[in-house]
Image (spheres, rainbow, N blue to C red):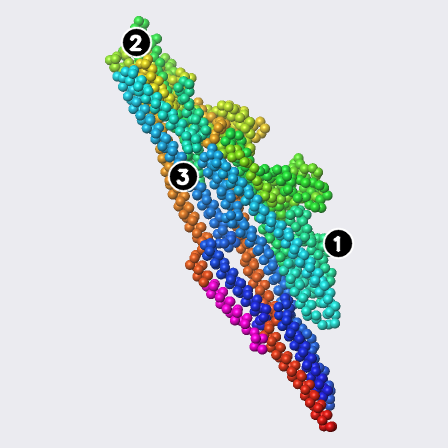
Amino acid sequence: MADLLSIGLSGLSASKTQLSITGHNITNVNTPGYSRQDASQATRSPQFSGAGYIGSGTTLVEIRRTYSEFLTTQLRSSTSLSSDVEAYKSQINQLDSLLAGTTTGITPSLQKFFSALQTAAEDPANIPARQLVLAEAEGLSRRFNTVYDRLSEQNSFTNKQMSAVTDQVNRLAGSIGRLNESIAIAAANGKQPNDLLDARDEAVRELSTYIGVTVVPQDDSSFNIFIGSGQPLVISSTVSRLEVLPGQGDPNRHEVQFVSGGSRQTITTQITGGELGGLIRYREEVLDSTMNSLGRLALAVSDQVNSQLGQGLDLKGQVGSALFGNYNDEALAKLRVNAFVGNTSNAQPALNITDTSVLTTSDYLMTFDGTLPDGYSARRLSDGQPITVELDSGVLTFTDQNGRDQGFEVVVGNPPPALNDKFSLQPTRRGATDITTVLDQADQLAFAAPVRAESALQNAGTGVIGQPDMVSGPSPIQLGQLNTAFTSSGLELRANVSGDTYTLTDATALPPGWGYVGADGAPLVDEVTGAPVTPEFKSGNSNTVRLAYTAASGEVYQFELSISGRPQTDDRFTLKFNQSGVSDNRNALKLVDLQGKQTVGVSLGADGKVISGVSLTDGYGELVERVGTLTAQARMDSDATGAILKQAQDNRDSLSAVNLDEEAANLIKFEQYYNASAQIIQVARSLFDTLISTFR
Amino acid sequence: MRISTLQAFNNGVTGLQRNYANATRTQEQISTGNRILTPADDPVASVRLLQLEQQQNVLNQYKSNLTAADNSLTQEEVTLNSVNTVLHRVRELALRAGNGSLEAEDRKSIAAELREREDELLSLMNTRNARGEYLFSGFQGKTQPFVRGADGSYSYQGDEGQRKLQIASSLNIAISDSGKSIFQNVTNAGRLDSALDTSGIPVGSTSTLAVSKPLVSDEVAFGGDGGFPAQGVELEFQANGTYTIYRLPRTYDPATEDVLADDLAMDSNPDKSDQLVFRGVTLHLEGAPVGGETVRIELDDSSGEVKEKQGILDTIANLRSALENPSTSNGGVRDAVAVSLTNLDHGMISVDAARGNIGARLNVIESTLTDNEDVALVNKSVQAELRELDYAEALSRLSFQTIILEAAQQSYVKISGLNLFNKM
């Protein structure tokens, strides 16, 4: 009877605990990371009697959580992947709409600028049309600046977000460390502290939304957590920190440092997964190259337009002024070189752009490490290719493995770098913000070509001379040199007919500095004697005359013009400085041509001819396409990782999460169980009563 | 499969969100009319669209260039038409002046009208466009091209520049012509001179031979193979009135002398003017030769250089001054009129050639305009194909998505209402 009472009591206690567990489950239905719990029951040790073993009631053996290590790990890794992709996607989506928008992209402004040039070319003396060119140029440089600002904002947002994320990582790492400790203590009695374990799993899951982690469970139930390429973030209860600091090579690009005790390690490039991984990946893959592409485009625009303007004459007959600001201004040139924080010298070299058409969109890392021949070594960061650096009177030139010039040079300056000083070179990064429109006098736009041709009125023959085209020459051209070249009467070419062919003024009789050249610009000389050769032309054909003038200081002006018809001996043709040629639009037409000319990312063959390259608009189109493709890819990735995450979450929830219907059934079940156990006590009582009343 | 309550709710909400996002996106496509909302929707098509848009803009620019070219050329054509009218009138006047029966007074009145026409022509050649730039001064739009000097002769101050405009991707068209090529670069029929030398006639005799100024009346016969010798010819008269034409320079050695024609004879009437047409050159001979006279016909370099070309204005001015001068002989007037008429004809041909050029360019403009419009049309349709939404498809998609969304909402409410606790 006492047995019966104790059996009933064990049932009461078991069912009450079961009810508590059910209540715990119900109330935690919405707790993140909660795994439903249940208790396993077992019979108590039976008592031996003569008849055999008699059961002595029930007991609760263990309270377990329904949990799968595998599913939780899967959920964690897919969470990390998914937040990486989401962070990347949300950044690139902004960029995508920024670049292609009709009001935000570069294309419309570029188009407007060239349209204004076309309009002005129609009537080069028209001041309002010229003003429009200035206004559109201003608009174009502003647009470059604005897009750069937006990209720069994204960069500083990335920096801030990296700090914020790192704070979260540190907070979670701290709580995981504390949980590790509590769990180790709690688990020492051999029982699992279910709720603590859930809390820690949830903390690790949350951590993996911020950064990719590797979890290694230990024997004492604690978790060791590693990030990056194996940096221990949490070892049992010892927690390391992440810190975000301005980058060594570029203070605008923050880097993540792993701080463990007294040691620091930069792990930016090793971080994968989580929001931090996504942000870093976006910066590396998209933001940097977009800024560089845009910068290169801006440099190409200002270089091409300025150079062409420098080869023409303005309304006042002066050499054209630059429309866009000088990108090799000393202050700007120094901004392109970042000395590393740890450098021992105060060297601050300057980077000058020498040829915008061959610039790449990469950054470079230059080290003064004693590499032969001149002590400098450099690496192109986009593909890691080593770059040959040569020093010539304080100026470093850079060529890649194929011997291609990289389009810039570095002026070492004073003080010189110390051994192992490092510099990050960013030729194009700031191009889009450095572009400015500096010209404000519309009449100083050079729309006229510097030289014109005339034939003497009294020529007996029918020779017709075309207007000369300045094929190459310095920019800006020097009026003094042209005046010397043409004198006031011009360069006279006198025809000398012999049979069906004719020559112009003999090469030896040309004024000093002048000579006939071939299509490649090389002087025409006799192969044997080296004496200048006079080219022969065919009467009646359209012939191309190529002449070059070498100024005393070495500048070469090369001209091309056509002569057709049949000149007669002593017919005269004159090349002249284009005095008061206000209605001449030849230079404006050349400016217009720049729109479709291959001027960006040009690769030159051995003969100096353009093999490949893109036009200004196509250069931008390429950028838009690249970003568009990456965005589309990010969207697909996002769909895919989203689906994987959902599946992992479903799998985990299916196993571990609470189902209220189930719990309601359990409530009923355990209530009934409780009632029944109580009935056992009731029976035991009535048995006792019956016995007592027998003795009354 | 066991479904936890959280999962049931989450799935329901995710489903609702997804359906809602789909419907919203379709709605956005419908409201903008665009299939591509950002480049990522279709990167390849986006770049193609960017290129097409640029081409479209360039085509628009070409269109306004074409209009500008058309305006410019039309204005030039109108001016040249006026020039042509004036030249026709001048030619009539020159023909009238050639009438040998005119008195000096009549000539003067013709000269007076010529002066008016000359001024009219000068102002036409110095025509300016609406922006005040000279039409015919080449590159020097602000420089007056034709200027009358102190001696009444005309000089051209412009250059040979021709302004061009781009009207198609690889087509530039000239929208101006220089005054030099139209009005100055006109072949001069009076570029030869004749010199009569009577020193070789028999002593005591008197030669009444007179020669006119030679006129290059046929440029084709004058130039080319077998044309007029570059250094000129000499006519040598014999006593019987016949003459021989030698090539200059002469060697006076029958073995090497180049006789171009011999046994030519003048007619017997000394009062009648004889006309010699030799290799494109027309010469009038009068009077009676006695033998021994020589006439050299050479390029006229009396003014320092040979006037191969003479401007239209100078031609008219020369004729006018010959008519104005009362001391000009009948022969002088005849010569002046003959040279002027030929030069005027050359000038009119030059002006006509320029007009023909303009007409050809206007034709090019017209066909280019059509071409560009065709390309623009194709562009537009490609753009539409790439970018624009198929409304029928989008609307049916929207209604389908709406149905799904509604169904999801209703089923969600129903299922989330199923709960055992409600029954307890």
Q: Can see residue A305?
A: yes
- Magenta: predominant secondary structure element? helix
The x, y position of residue A474, in whole percent, is 55, 33
* Chain for disc number 2: B
Residue most toward the front?
A696
Which is more toward the observer, A639 or A570?
Answer: A639
Write down the quadrant of residue A454 in the picture: top left
Marks 3,2: beta carbons within 8 A: no
Could you tell me which secondary element the residue under label 3 belongs to?
A: helix
Q: CA distance from mark 3 to mark 2?
A: 68 Å
**In this rendering, is residue A695 above or below B386?**
below
The x, y position of residue B350, in whole percent, is 36, 28
- Give the number of the mark in front: 3 or 2: 3
The residue under the point 41% across, 18% down is B151
Which amino acid type corresponds to the residue marked 2 in the rendered image?
Ser
* Chain for disc number 3: B
**In this rendering, is residue A127 above or below B155?**
below
Which amino acid type corresponds to the residue marked 3 in the rendered image?
Thr
Q: Is residue B405 magenta?
A: yes
Could you tell me which secondary element the residue under label 1 belongs to?
A: loop
The x, y position of residue A480, in whole percent, is 55, 27
- Give the number of the mark in front: 1 or 2: 1
Residue highlighted by disc 3: B67
The residue under the point 31% across, 20% down is B110
Residue highlighted by disc 2: B207
Horizontally, is A620 left or right of A193 in the view?
Answer: left
